[in-house]
Amino acid sequence: KWHRFPVQSRADWEEHIKWRYDANHPDRFPPDFAERCRLLRQRDHVLSINVNGPFWQLREWLGLENLCLLLVEDPGFALEMIALWRDFVTQVLERIFANVDVDDVHVSEDMAYKAHSLISPAMCRRFLMPTWAAWADLVRAQPNTIMSMDSDGYIGELIPLWIESGITVCDPVEVAAGNDIVDYRRRFGRRMAYRGGIDKR
C-alpha cells in the first residue's frame, strides 16, 4: 500500500530522488559484475533485461493521478524527470552491452486500461516516444537484441507508436481488454510480434 508517493514537489525531487540516479556511482554495479558477465557469455538461455519505461517510472515517483496532472500543468518538470530517467537507463544499458550480449530489453509501461491508453497518442508522442526511440536506437546497435514492450489494457492505439519508435515485440496482449492478435497482424503486418494473447486471469 502506498501511503505517499515520494515526489510531491520539485523540492522532493531535488532532495530525495534526483541524486540517487547516478549510473557511474561505484556502488551501482555489484563487485562481481565482470564475472557475472563472463558466465553469461557462456549461457544457453535467453538473457532479458527489464527496465521501467518513462511512464511507469514517473508513476512510481508521482502516482498516476499526479503524473497525469503534471503532464498538463507542468510539462517542463515532467520532461526533466523523463530526461534523467532516459539518460540513467541508457548509461546502465551501455555498460551492460559493453560486457555481454543481451537478447531482449523488455520495457514495462502498463499505460492502458480496458478501453484506451491512459494518455493520448499525442501526449505519448511528446513525452514518451523520444525515450523509447533513443533506447531502441541503442538496442538496434547490438548484434542480436530486440526491444519489447509490456503494457496491460487495450493497446491498439499504442502499437503504431511503438512501431514508429523501433519496438518490435509487445505483451501480454490481453484478450480481456479487447486485443485481437489476428486483427493486429492484419493491420500492422510483421512490423510487430506478440507474446501472450490469452486471458491472463
Image (tube, helix red, strand yellow):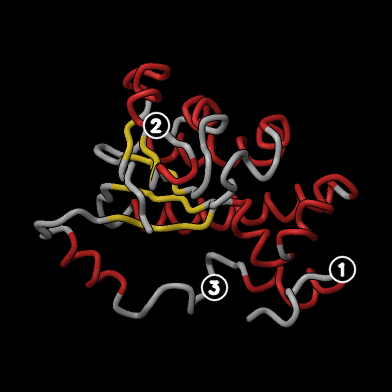
| Label placed on residue 9 | 1
- Kindly report the distance in space between the C-alpha atoms of the residues bearing marks 2 and 3: 44 Å
Please state which amino acid type lies under the numbered disc 3.
His
Please name the residue shown 84% across and 47% down the image: 76
Report which residue position mark 2 lands on: 180
List x then y, in percent, for residue 9: 87, 68
Element at badge 3?
loop
- For numbered disc 1, what is the local secondary structure? loop
Quarter location, residue 146: top left
Q: Which residue is mark 3?
A: 25
Residue 191's label in the rendered image is none
Q: Quadrant of the C terminus?
A: bottom left
Q: Quadrant of the N terminus?
A: bottom right
Where residue 178 sits in the image (x, y, percent)?
Answer: 47, 37
Mark toward the start of the polypeptide (2 vs 1): 1
Q: What's the residue type where badge 1 is placed?
A: Ser
- Work out whether mark 2 precedes mark 3 in sequence or the reverse, and give the earlier one: 3
Seen at 54% across and 40% down, the residue is 132
Question: Which secondary structure lies at badge 2?
Answer: loop
From the image, state whether disc 3 or disc 1 is nearer to you.
Answer: 1
Asked if the residues shown at circle 2 and circle 3 are in contact, with their CB atoms under 8 angstroms apart, the answer is: no
